[in-house]
Amino acid sequence: MIAGPAQPPSPARLARVPWTRNERSAVAGLKTTSYAENVVALAEAARLGADEAVLANTVGDLCEGTGSNVFVE
């Protein structure tokens, strides 16, 4: 591994979709085989002209994307 200055990421267009992640779900934090919610959210993002959909949890906090994680730098 070589450490050095990071290259800026490519810009992405995001859309916040109206559906939420349930942080109290019985399967919260587990990898499950159902990707259906992500497919619906990503289709909505595409309809809005975005590359990725971001979702909030049930209390309105930014949670994750359909195929990405959220980091604040």
Image: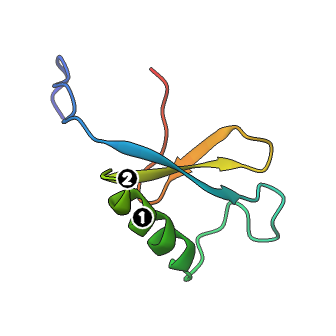
Label 1 environment density (alpha carbons within 10 Å; few <14, some 14–19, many ≥20): many
Q: Is residue 34 left or right of residue 51?
A: right
Residue at image coords 65%, 46%: 56
- Residue reaching furthest top? 5
Q: Residue 34, how many percent across, how many down?
A: 56, 82
The circle on residue 42 is 1
Residue type indicated by callout 2: Glu
Q: Is residue 39 left or right of residue 26?
A: left
Please tell me which residue lies in front, 59 or 1: 59
Report which quarter residue 22 is drawn in: bottom right
Residue 55's place in the image compared with 7, above or below, is: below
Q: Is residue 29 left or right of residue 26?
A: left
Residue type indicated by callout 1: Leu
Q: Under tag 2, what secondary structure?
A: strand
Label 1 to label 2, Cα distance in Å?
6 Å
Residue at image coords 44%, 63%: 44
Q: Quadrant of the C terminus?
A: top left
Residue 66's place in the image compared with 10, above or below, is: below
Give the mark nearest the N terminus, 1 or 2: 1
Q: Under tag 1, what secondary structure?
A: helix
Residue at image coords 32%, 50%: 50
Q: Quadrant of the N terminus?
A: top left
Report which quarter residue 29 is drawn in: bottom right
Label 2 environment density (alpha carbons within 10 Å; few <14, some 14–19, many ≥20): many
Q: Are marks 1 and 2 in contact (CB under 8 Å)?
A: yes
Q: Residue 20, how many percent across, how many down?
A: 68, 56
- Residue reaching furthest front? 48
Query: Residue at label 2?
Result: 52
Residue at image coords 56%, 72%: 37
Q: Residue 6, how many percent across, how many down?
A: 20, 23
